[in-house]
Structures are given as C-alpha cells and as structure tokens.
Image (cartoon, coloured by chain):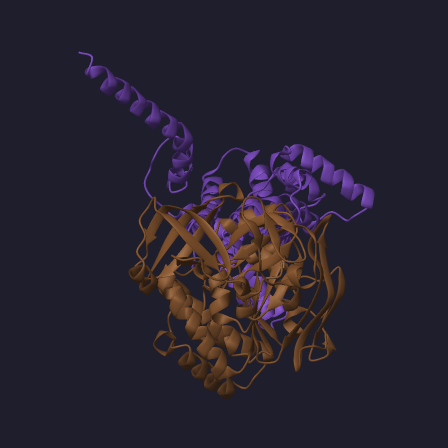
Chain colours: A brown, B purple
C-alpha cells in the first residue's frame, strides 16, 4: 500500500473473526497524514470492528496495523497515540466538562499549568468555554458531542477515530456539525477517520471513502469517484439513488430486452466483460427530451411526480425492459422549462458517459443492497 | 347495600394488616421497651431508666464479645466487599453462565446449619486453628453472594464504554478503576458493605460452629446465647437493643444509598 504518500496508518491484510464469524475479511488500507477518511457501510459490514482494531480494543486475528511505520497491532489502547470518539460519547458522568477534557492529559502526567492551558484552548475551539463547570447530564446532545470531541482532541492524537459521530443528533444539528468537524480538523491538523452508515455524512466530510461490504472494501476513492464512477453494484446502490437496467454485457454495451443496446462506460465496458450485467445511472443524469437526441434514448410513461421545492422527482415506467421503473430527478429550472404531467408519455436520454456498465447479476449482494435501501 | 361490601372487605384487610405488623414488631418493641425498665422484672413497668445500658458498658465479657463481633464484621465485610465486587464485575461482563449464576445464589439459600457444619468439617480437614479468623472467613463466604447481588444491581446501569474511554485516553487499569469505575459504583459497594456488616454482626449459627472452644472468640450473639441460659435479664434486652440499633442503622444507610442513581 505504498500508493498513498505520507502514509500515517496502514492496514495489511487485517482480519478479525469472532468464533466462526468473519467481521473483517483481509483489509488493506493506507490512510494519509492529515486526511479525513471515512469508513462507510451498512451495519454488520465490519467498519466498527476495523475502527476498534485501530483504537486497540480488538486485536486482529491476522494481519498487521502500523502507525507511522511502527507496528501497533498488539499495543494496548492506552499506549497508542490514537483517540476514539465513542458513538455514545462515553463522557464520565461524575466529572465536569473541564475534568472530562483534562482526564487524558492527567493520565499522561502533564504538568498542571500545561493541562489548564491546553484544556482552555480546546474548550475555546469547541465553543464550550462557558460550559466548563457543567456535568454531562446538564448538556444538550450537541454539546455532549462537542465535549467528547474536545476530550479526544486535547490529546493531540496522531489519529482521531470517530464512531458514528453525529448519529445521536437531529438532522439540522447534524448538518451543522458536519461542517464544524471539517473546520476543526483543518484548525488542529489531525488525521480523522470516521465510521458511518450515513452516506451523506461521508460525502460531505471525507476526502476519501472506503465503502465496506461484508468485511471487505467494495471500493475506495474520493466522494466524487464513488458517486460518479462506482465499480460494482454494491457501491452503486449504497451511495445515493441509482437506476439499474438489467441485461447482458457485450462488446458495445448492455443488451436489454425490449430496449436494445445501452451504451456506457465503466469497469465492465472497459475490459470488455461479457455475461450478465447492468447499466447504472443517476436520476439526475436522465434528461427529458422532445426529439430523439444523441445518447441512450428511452421512452416511458410518467407514473408519479414528487415536488421537492428545489427539484422534482419522477417515477417513469419504461416501454420495454419488462416495464422497469426508473427515477428521474430534475432541477427546478429544467422542470419549469419542460413541465410534465402524471400519465404523460415522455422520451428520455441518458448520456453514455453517465452510464456505468457493471458486471454481475442483481443478486450478487442482495442482502447488502436491501440494507442500503433501508437508508 | 352492594356498595358497602368493598369497604367492608377493605376494613377487614386493614385489620389484617395491623395484626400482621403487630405480629412482626410487637415482640421487638417489647424487648426494646423492657431494656429501659428500671426494675429487672419482665412483667411490670417500673419507670424509665438507662441503668441496664450503663451496666452493660461495664460488663467485661460483653464488651469483649462486642469487640470480637466488630472485628469479625469488619473483617468479613472487607473481604466480601472486595471479592464480591470483583465477582459482580466478572458476572456482568463475562460470558453469561447459568451455572455461575446459580452457584452465586446458593450461599444465600443453603441453610445456615448446613453451611456451619460444612465449614467446620472443612476447617477440621485443613487442621485450621478455630478462632476469630475462621469466623471471618466463614462469614465472608456467604457475604460474597450478597455483596455480588447488590453490586450487580448497580452495575446494570453502568456504561462499560466508560472503561474503554478511559483506556483510550491513556489511563491504565488502576487509574480507570479509581477515577472512573469506583465513583460510579461506590454507593452500591458501600450499601453492599453495610449489608455484609449487619449480616455478619448478628450471625450466630455459623459463628458458633466455627469459633472453636474457649471464650476468646465469643461473638456478641454467642455471648447473649450463653447469658440467656440463666434467664432473660434486662441486661440482655439492652444488649439486644444495641445490636438491633446497629443493624437497623446500617440497613437504613444501605437502603438510602442503593436506589439513588448518581449521574
């Protein structure tokens, strides 16, 4: 894994079994210094187990973890320059905010005035100064989250791990904290690794994302890579909304019953794979056209329209392709320029550069995609 | 008339309640009352007096028995509180085991006399010298079960991720225990300790069997038993009242500590 420059944390063939169950199945990973890295996946994909191994609460069954090139596979959690922000926050209920934050520095045996100074700085960074004397139960969810963050940041860890950091907050606060976390990371210059099942959270915050499926990395890349260029069905389905057309892959594209050839790009198209496959495209990449334009032409009937204010989403039942329903998302501008009504027959175009041709049948990760649908 | 029936039932139940409570507490009340009776007669009230308590305070054998009882109770409490708390943690965190659960309850329900004989046999087998020390160990045996039960109730609300959080922040096991775990479970541990103290302080059968010959390791209940063979004296009433007061006090403190959730 020398592909990443300035590697801070490296996982080499890390594996974890609990009895007969494989939670993490041979993961190779390199996280760069100062990166905001996300481990994304449905529950049970092994992301939390991987995080706990990095923190030191679990020991890998096989494989190696290194930090700054030093093997930390079996180093106990209290001797790693790594801190974890717990999903439950795990604040000490009998201590004030200040004492919670100072705890880690006291454990290091830092001098008193240094502790006071650093605690003060971190409380300021996390906007907790006025709450220093409060106990955790006197704080709101968002404030508790910030205390948990402050308690970890004050240690100036090489690596800060965040386990579902925002899951306990309501939607509005969550969006605010996503940006706050990004800001604080820039200020403190610490490498962040966040575990989340929330794809939006990962897309907003992370520089790079590893999508995990059943203990393996399904795909690793920048948010844009993953969203625009998924390499398999699991990633395609897990991130955002995606339309799938099923068919047989050939040298020129995907042959779909009743639709003809759907052209596209992607791993299956590039290496000339043949066999069962699919064409995946985003609802926002579908255009409603009046004349037949260049690209993949489709036709269908509008079955439902949902209005979202800034956009409009349609469900269109295709002519051919066994009546597959696809989702179409249109910006407010496009919807105004060419209004459609429910029941109307429409022509659609999907530019081939926005169609991903992926190999494999729809059942290859049925369980995992059902999980993704739930979100 | 049918409306009168529930209130009739209720009245009968009320009387029943009073009778049951009287049955439970009148003998004790009489005992306490008679300990303040000026004359030494158990039948006639001749006026209020602390005489018997004063007399108690100057009776050598009683004082030495009281001292023994306190030594035994403190010793048994320390051992059982430490071991019982550890056991509670193990049971709460470890793999669930029906066998371990059941064996924990056993010392609480095994008849004292069986326990007493078993312990005596065991000590004899080990050729241990019977005395205060053997009583302490014997009391610790059944107390561990009670302590573990009380501490476990407390641990049900304990967030074990706090232990991981403490380790994550760089604290070793000792710091974690002293700074994080103990403050959280202390009320439960103190309550368990007080319970252990009262159970040990007035325990008779097991102490009687494991004390060995001679008066050097006579505890308070054993002393009372010895005195009572010559009739119930107001002195014994006073002594029993003291024992009662100690036990009730400890239990009240223990109960006060127990249900309150410290956040």
Q: Is there any visible trace of residue A201 in the rendered image?
A: yes
Q: Quadrant of residue B75?
A: bottom right
Does A166 appear above or below B79? below
Does A191 appear above or below B162? below
Q: Nearer the viewer, residue A148 or B153?
A: A148
Query: Image quadrant for the N terminus of chain A?
Result: bottom right
Q: Residue at x 60, y 41 (%)?
A: B222
Q: Quadrant of residue A136?
A: bottom left
Find residue B227 and report its horizontal and vertical position in percent: 56, 39
Does A220 appear above or below B129? below
Find residue B259 and report its horizontal and vertical position in percent: 43, 49
Q: Nearer the viewer, residue B116 or A30?
A: A30
Q: Is residue A20 left or right of residue B202?
A: right
| Residue sitting at the far top | B1
Q: Is there any visible trace of residue B72 in the rendered image?
A: no
Q: Nearer the viewer, residue B20 or B173?
A: B173
Does A11 appear above or below B203? below
Find residue A244 and report its horizontal and vertical position in percent: 54, 51
Q: Is residue A324 left or right of residue A213?
A: left
Q: Residue at x 59, y 81 (%)?
A: A109
Q: Nearer the viewer, residue A65 or B92?
A: A65
Q: Is residue A327 left or right of residue A75?
A: left
| Residue sitting at the far left | B1
Find residue A330 and report its horizontal and vertical position in percent: 37, 60
| Residue sitting at the far front | A291
């Amino acid at each position: 894994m020398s592909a990443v420059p300035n590697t801070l944390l490296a996982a080499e063939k890390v594996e974890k079994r609990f009895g007969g169950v494989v939670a993490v199945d041979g993961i190779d990973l390199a996280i760069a210094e100062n990166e905001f890295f996300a481990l994304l996946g449905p529950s049970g994909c092994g992301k939390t187990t991987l995080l706990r191994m990095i923190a030191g609460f679990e020991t890998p069954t096989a494989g190696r973890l290194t930090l700054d090139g030093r093997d930390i596979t079996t180093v106990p959690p209290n001797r790693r320059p790594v801190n974890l922000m717990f999903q439950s926050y795990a604040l000490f209920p009998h201590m004030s905010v200040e004492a919670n934050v100072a705890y880690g520095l006291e454990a290091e045996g830092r001098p008193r005035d240094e502790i006071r100074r650093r605690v003060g700085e971190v409380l300021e960074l996390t906007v907790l100064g006025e709450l220093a004397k409060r106990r955790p139960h006197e704080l709101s969810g968002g404030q508790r989250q910030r205390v948990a963050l402050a308690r970890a940041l004050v240690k100036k860890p090489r690596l800060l791990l965040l386990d579902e950091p925002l899951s306990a907050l309501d939607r509005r606060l969550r969006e605010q904290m996503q940006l706050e976390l990004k800001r604080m990371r820039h200020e403190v210059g610490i490498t962040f690794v966040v575990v989340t099942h929330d794809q939006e959270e990962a897309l907003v915050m992370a520089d790079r994302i590893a999508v995990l499926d059943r203990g393996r990395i399904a795909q690793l890349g920048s948010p844009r890579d993953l969203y625009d260029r998924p390499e398999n069905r699991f990633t395609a389905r897990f991130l955002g909304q995606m339309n799938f057309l099923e068919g047989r892959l050939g040298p020129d594209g995907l042959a779909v019953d009743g639709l003809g050839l759907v052209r596209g790009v992607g791993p299956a198209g590039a290496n000339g794979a043949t066999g069962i496959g699919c064409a995946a495209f985003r609802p926002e990449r579908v255009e409603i056209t009046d004349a037949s334009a260049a690209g993949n032409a489709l036709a269908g009937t509008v079955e439902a329209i949902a209005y979202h204010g800034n956009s409009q989403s349609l469900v269109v039942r295709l002519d051919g392709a066994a009546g597959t329903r696809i989702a179409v998302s249109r910006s407010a501008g496009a919807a105004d320029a060419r209004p459609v009504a429910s029941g109307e027959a429409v022509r659609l175009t999907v530019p081939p550069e926005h169609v991903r041709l992926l190999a494999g049948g729809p059942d290859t990760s049925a369980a995992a995609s059902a999980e993704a649908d739930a979100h | 008339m049918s409306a009168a029936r529930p209130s009739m039932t209720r009245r009968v139940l009320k009387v029943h309640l009073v009778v049951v409570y009287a049955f439970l507490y009148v003998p004790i009340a009489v005992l306490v009352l008679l300990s303040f009776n000026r004359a030494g007669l158990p039948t006639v009230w001749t006026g209020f007096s602390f005489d018997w308590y004063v007399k108690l305070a100057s009776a050598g054998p009683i004082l030495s028995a009281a001292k023994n009882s306190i030594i035994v109770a403190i010793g048994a409490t320390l051992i059982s509180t430490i071991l019982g708390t550890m056991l509670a943690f193990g049971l709460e965190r470890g793999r669930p085991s029906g066998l371990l659960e059941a064996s924990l309850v056993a010392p609480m329900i095994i008849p004292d006399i069986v326990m007493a004989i078993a312990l005596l046999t065991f000590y004899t087998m080990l050729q241990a010298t019977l005395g205060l020390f053997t009583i302490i160990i014997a009391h610790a045996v059944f107390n561990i079960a009670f302590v573990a039960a009380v501490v476990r109730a407390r641990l049900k609300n304990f967030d074990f991720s706090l232990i991981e959080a403490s380790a994550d922040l760089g604290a070793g096991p000792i710091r974690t225990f002293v700074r994080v775990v103990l403050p959280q479970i202390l009320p439960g541990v103190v309550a368990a300790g007080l319970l252990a103290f009262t159970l040990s302080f007035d325990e008779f059968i097991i102490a009687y069997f494991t004390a060995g010959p001679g008066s050097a390791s006579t505890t308070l209940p054993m002393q009372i038993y010895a005195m009572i063979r010559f009739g119930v004296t107001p002195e014994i009433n006073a002594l029993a009242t003291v024992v009662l007061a100690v036990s009730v006090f400890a239990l009240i403190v223990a109960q006060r500590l127990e249900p309150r959730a410290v956040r």
